[in-house]
Image: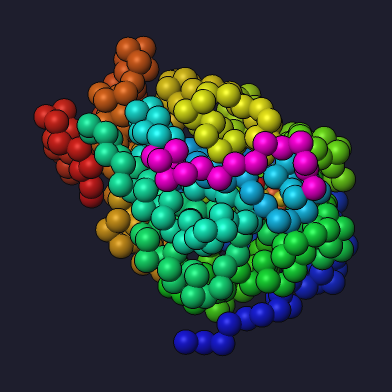
Amino acid sequence: MTAVVEKGTFIDDAAVEDALRAASTKDAGRVREILAKAEELKGLDMDEVAVLSSISDPELMAELFATAREVKEAIYGARLVLFAPLYISNLCTNDCLYCAFRVRNKALRRRALTQEEIRHEVEVLVDQGHKRVLLVAGESYPKENGFQYVLDSIATVYDVKRGNGEIRRVNVNVAPLSVDEFRALKATGIGTFQLFQETYHRATYKAVHVGGKKKDFDWRVTGMHRAMEAGIDDVGIGVLFGLADWRFEILAMLQHIRELERAYGVGPHTISVPRLEPASGSDMASHPPQPVSDVDFRKLVAILRLAVPYTGMILSTRETANLRRETFALGISQISAGSRTNPGGYEEDEEFDAAQFQLGDHRSLDEVIRDISELGFVPSFCTACYRLGRTGMDFMDLAKPGDIKHHCDPNALSTYLEYLLDYGAPETRRVGEETIARKVAEMDPIRRAHTEKMLDRVRAGKRDVLC
Ligand code: SAM
Ligand code: SF4
């Protein structure tokens, strides 16, 4: 075991500021050189990302977006993996000025779901067709069992079986843990451990985290080191955009990624790109200190796609349906749908006084699926990789030469078909069957034969057909 890193010195503010100062897009030739390098799918360094982040010329912007679309298509094809967040508790001892769950928001109705209530929430999600959840909680666990509460909750989620349905992958977004706690978390069979730094800008971090354990920037930024030390090799990072300058954030995030690659040979499995949304009891949430415009948001997604082409990117229902439609093709690989951010929100079907923030996309899972299918994407409920041990470095070894899509495409289509047969509304089923037929027809003969066999097995009643 290597010594666990305790300080976030790998986030070098001065180096980020220098790179941003030196970047200039007056030189269109330099931008085009960088875009040409990005097309080789080898990623970009900090100086190159700084140059792309300062593009404002419409022609260069269009070229940036076109390159991002090409890279997304080359690596992820048309697939979009679906999941739902599962909020188990809004208890929290921290005081993050942007969040409705913060300890000083006395108006919030507090609640930690019981295991029985969690079971009911999961039943609703399974009956909608979900196969993946992201378990979310504030940083405070019920007195009776402490952190064991989270471990028990994961076991409850995996335990729910409903006809053909079950949750096959539980990802987790909770406060950073010690190495021993991470080991216990891994033992429950989680998929990805997610933790957003919120902001990599130390002064901003200090100004917006005014109480509780989360005040400690270093404890949080070294969280993924501890997770990896404990053997969790699929980790998901993120920034809460709107707190500090987004250009600073993506460069600093790149430093975090390169540090994980240096220390553990593999970077994060996913990047999340939440933007600040209005939240009850938070003035800051409605008035972000450094708001990110829709154009800049799409730009930052495109740049991240080019900078770390093999890292999945997640877009949540914080964003509106329209913005989501415009952003998917620029680099998004996973999306949430039909979400609630209040504990118990699926069973109660209400969204208000216990929620973490306001949602931008209120459509049901089925509506989102039909919409993205009509746009030419393939909704995927695939969970094969981590269940077949393709995680961390093993995943990247397959992903980098482009081999992973030979697994992903058939798995996406077979899990999409499962959804259509078991849960799809008639119109969704019609649209989906067309999408599947078109995608199968586009495959080379060997892959097509293999995929048709998998689809036949699903039509014959078999479920969870993995390759
Ligand atoms: N409490 C844990 C923590 O802070 O790491 C885990 C989950 S927290 C409920 C999930 C994420 O929600 C935070 O990391 C933050 O990025 C995001 N969030 C908080 N307030 C938000 C807001 N007003 N708008 C959008 N996202 C928000
Ligand atoms: Fe608590 Fe997380 Fe909200 Fe901060 S962001 S107040 S830690 S739930």
Residue at horizontal 74 percent and vertical 44 percent from the top: 99
Number of numbered discs on residues: 0
What is the quadrant of residue 385 in the picture?
bottom left
Q: Main secondary structure of the magenta part?
A: loop
Give the colour scheme shown: rainbow
**Any part of residue 220 in sight:** yes
On screen, residue 128 above or below 115: above
Pick the front one: 109 or 20: 109
Q: Can you say whether 121 is above or below 218 in the image?
A: above
Q: Is residue 392 visible?
A: no
Quadrant of the rendered structure where residue 183 is? Answer: bottom left
Residue 79 located within the stretch drawn in magenta: no
Residue under the point 76% across and 36% down? 107
Q: Would residue 113 appear left or right of 244 to someone viewing this image?
A: left
Residue at screen point 42% across, 22% down: 366
Q: Residue 400: horizontal and vertical position, in percent?
A: 42, 61
The residue sitting at 67% across, 52% down in the picture is 92
Residue 182 drawn above or below residue 131: below
Q: Position of residue 289 (x, y in %)?
A: 87, 45
Q: In this orientation, which residue lies closer to the viewer: 111 or 433? A: 111
Q: Nearer the viewer, residue 460 or 438?
A: 460
Give the residue furthest to the top. 427
**x and y percent of residue 139 in the render?**
63, 56
User: Between 304 and 260, which is closer to the camera in this rendering?
Assistant: 260
Going by the image, does 273 lie left or right of 156? right
x then y, percent, for residue 235: 51, 61
- Name the quadrant containing residue 363: top right
Find the magenta span and give its range: 104-119
